Image (tube, helix red, strand yellow):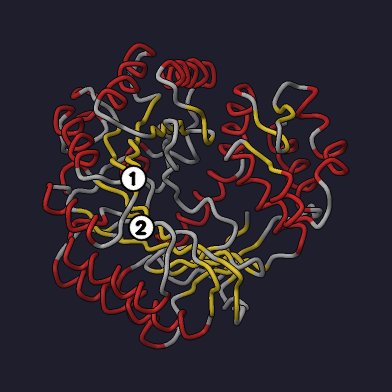
Amino acid sequence: MYRIAKTLLRTAVTGQWRPLVLRQGQPRLPRRMAWAGLYLHVPFCRDLCPYCPYNRWPYDDTAYAVFEEAVKIEIARTAQRIAIDRIPSLYVGGGTPTVNVDGLLRILAHIRSHFGQIDETCVELHPAWMPPETLARLRDAGVDRVSVGAQTFHDHHLERIGRKHTAAAGAEAVRSAVAAGFDTVNVDLMFVLPGQTVDEVRADAEGAIAAGAHQISANPMLGFPYSERGREEGLRRVRRPNGRLTRRMLAAIDGVARSHGFERCAVWSWLAPSRRKFSTVARHYYLGFGPSAASMTGRDLFFNTFQVEAYAEAVRNGSPVTLCLPLNRRLEMAYWLYWRLYEMRVGRASFAGMFDRDLSAAAGWLFAAPRALGLMRKAADGYEVTGRGAYWIHRLQNGFSLEYITRIWTQCRRQPWPQEVRL
């Protein structure tokens, strides 16, 4: 029944009942884009956390040098091929981006020298790799927003998920980032951890705000089959957390955040007043650099090969793209709407700009069912997702995007150049 329902929903959204297929090939790159975000993936970590679902590799100086040389070539080549009128954001993820801070700063300077003005720069930080001097250098290099991966402020849970820092170190890392003067300091938390209670989740949210966080983002822990723990446990598919417990924990975090004046700015994020949110790749258009980096041009959604050596060799020989999904207008619109729902708001101006029609005219058929179910409501500038709706968007993510990620990641980690991945 679940598979049938998922197929019907996918057909309604995409307009086709056949699975989407990413194939080995090259994207149709535009010569000019009115705007696009940039994404840099730094794939290295000193310690590989067993639950982490992201593409990362054990750090060593030689491998990093190979990566740095290749990613600079990719950046320069892309800048020569595509003119971008405005770049609203650069997001740097990983891995641990500051595992080699000198290398990171060289790459950031390289990006700016080729692309020019960037409105905001957001960098992910690991509590064990962000001493005050590193924070000061990032600030001087134009980084204005950071996210500290504290995950939890309970030592027994940190140990259970394989994190090497302590709860005290996590709190101190948040305080150091705030003291460094970044415009926004986000704190990443995980919930539905093994054995975690609702009270502990509530305490984690309180701890992040007490340490000075301007934004908190909380994500449920999922068991990905391709992660170290997933392979160890023999998981065959994404392991979804208990739905009732997830809802209770989300409500606890929401209650803490709102009691401190924070407002919900995305399904998993709450932002303090007068702050601008830390943003990842929740952009409609963006160009990615580095192993496993994704890009979205409107014409195509495509991924670089995951393995560092394969990536470097491919860059030297031409292109590191391994899988590409051509997009028609309907698929592009579905992608856009997915991220707007994730951000919990569909604004009139942005809707009109994307769909070439007035939101009011479309809302009757587009949002009638969600409104009737209490998942969305009218807002001054369009429509917004309710707290109830946020939970069901999470369930939708589990049913589609997280399973899709699992299929892509599993194939791309297994071989650098898969022929196709069916979603």
Cβ atoms under marks 2 and 1 closer than 8 Å: no
Residue under label 1: 183
Q: Is residue 142 left or right of residue 347?
A: left
- Farthest top residue in view: 199
User: How many discs appear?
Assistant: 2
- Which element carries disc 1, helix, strand or loop? loop
Q: Is residue 116 left or right of residue 348?
A: left
Residues 365 and 248: in front is 365
Q: Quadrant of the N terminus?
A: top right
The image position of residue 34, as x and y in percent, is 61, 70
Q: Is residue 152 left or right of residue 365?
A: left
The image position of residue 365, as x and y in percent, is 87, 38
Q: Which residue: 52% across, 52% down? A: 407
Q: Which residue: 18% across, 24% down? A: 155
Q: Quadrant of the C terminus?
A: bottom right
- Which image quadrant for residue 370? top right
Q: Which residue: 77% across, 57% down? A: 330
The label number, if any, that marks residue 92 in the structure image: 2
